[in-house]
Amino acid sequence: MTTRVEIINDFLAINVTPGKTIQDIVEASGSALPFGCRDGECGTCVVLIESGMDYLSDMTDKEKAVMKTIGESSPKARLACQMKITQPNGLVRIKY
């Protein structure tokens, strides 16, 4: 069972199993979504979740702190390096 992840900017759609990080998905797909530190500290990989937030892991305290530091307040904003797919049979649409 998989969840479909669409990266809108790159016109990519990937079916993935729960437990995979968005970073894993992006790197395997050839997306141009940028990453910096890959550890949730720099804010380079901020994305907007256009739909499917229910299929993603909750925001960590580290992720919340980085969002505050970079001044990102949108409820749709997440760090791609910190999110994981948590449930099957869904659709997650990401825009960067």
Image (cartoon, rainbow, N blue to C red):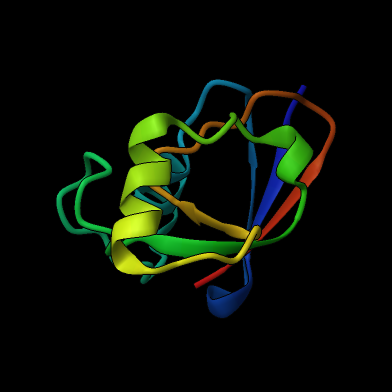
Front-most of 87 and 46?
46
Residue 6 at x, y = what percent?
Answer: 66, 59
Relative side of 83 to 13, left or right: left
**Residue 10 vertical placement versus 6 (above, below):** below
> In the image, what residue occupies the spot 73% across and 34% down?
55
Image location (x, y in percent) of residue 47: 50, 63
The x, y position of residue 85, in whole percent, is: 61, 31
On the image, the x and y values in percent for residue 2 come to: 73, 29
Q: Nearer the viewer, residue 31 or 23?
A: 23
Q: Quadrant of residue 53?
A: top right
Query: 94 or 64: nearer the eye?
Result: 64
Picture layout, residue 3 above or below residue 11: above
Q: Quadrant of residue 50?
A: bottom right
Residue depicted at 77% across the width and 21% down the height: 1
Q: Quadrant of residue 40?
A: top left
Q: How many marks?
A: 0
Farthest residue to the bottom: give it.
Answer: 9
